[in-house]
Amino acid sequence: QVQLVESGGGLVQPGGSLRLSCRFSGSFFSVKAMAWYRQVPGKQRELVAQNPTGGTTNYSDAVKGRFAMSRDHAKSTVYLQMNSLKPEDTAVYYCNADLWGEPHDYWGQGTQVTVSS
């Protein structure tokens, strides 16, 4: 069974940095795309970054130039490096995997990021 496990969230001051990790139980050969989403209470989950396998990573306008998504194939892990954090980046961040031939996406449990002084 496919599992995604996020880690790395926490409390950080404005202007600070955090790196989120998402460990994927499968192989990246089965992955069509990996993505990071975030959600605040009362709002819809929004796409932060999406990395199609073999393609270019796309970022939301809100995080472009500040966040960077990467993969470590040897560790079956994706990362989200978040720099110059702002209070409006506060949210629960979710890892997402879209697999070839699967009828639905897979989600991690989420990790809380709080940006506050």
Image (cartoon, grey):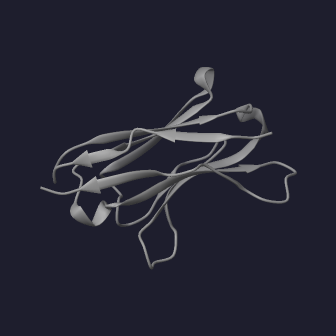
Q: Residue furthest top?
A: 74
Looking at the picture, how far across and down is residue 114, in whole percent?
29, 55
Q: Residue at x 59, y 23 (%)?
A: 75
Q: Residue furthest bottom?
A: 42
27 or 7: nearer the viewer: 7
In the shown orientation, is residue 89 left or right of residue 3?
left
Would you say residue 61 is visible in this rendering? Answer: yes
Looking at the picture, how far across and down is residue 27, in whole percent?
74, 31
Q: Residue at x 31, y 61 (%)?
A: 89
Up the image or down, 63 lies above or below 11; here it is below
43 or 57: nearer the viewer: 43
The total number of labels drawn is: 0
In the shown orientation, is residue 18 left or right of residue 8?
left
Up the image or down, 50 lies above or below 29; here it is below
Up the image or down, 46 lies above or below 43; here it is above
Looking at the picture, how far across and down is residue 39, in whole percent?
46, 66
Q: Which quarter of the rendered picture does the N terminus lie within?
A: top right
Would you say residue 50 is visible in this rendering? Answer: no
Q: Residue at x 26, y 48 (%)?
A: 11
Quadrant of res 9:
top left
Q: Which quarter of the rendered picture does the C terminus lie within?
A: bottom left
Q: Residue at x 22, y 59 (%)?
A: 86
In the shown orientation, is residue 42 left or right of residue 82?
right
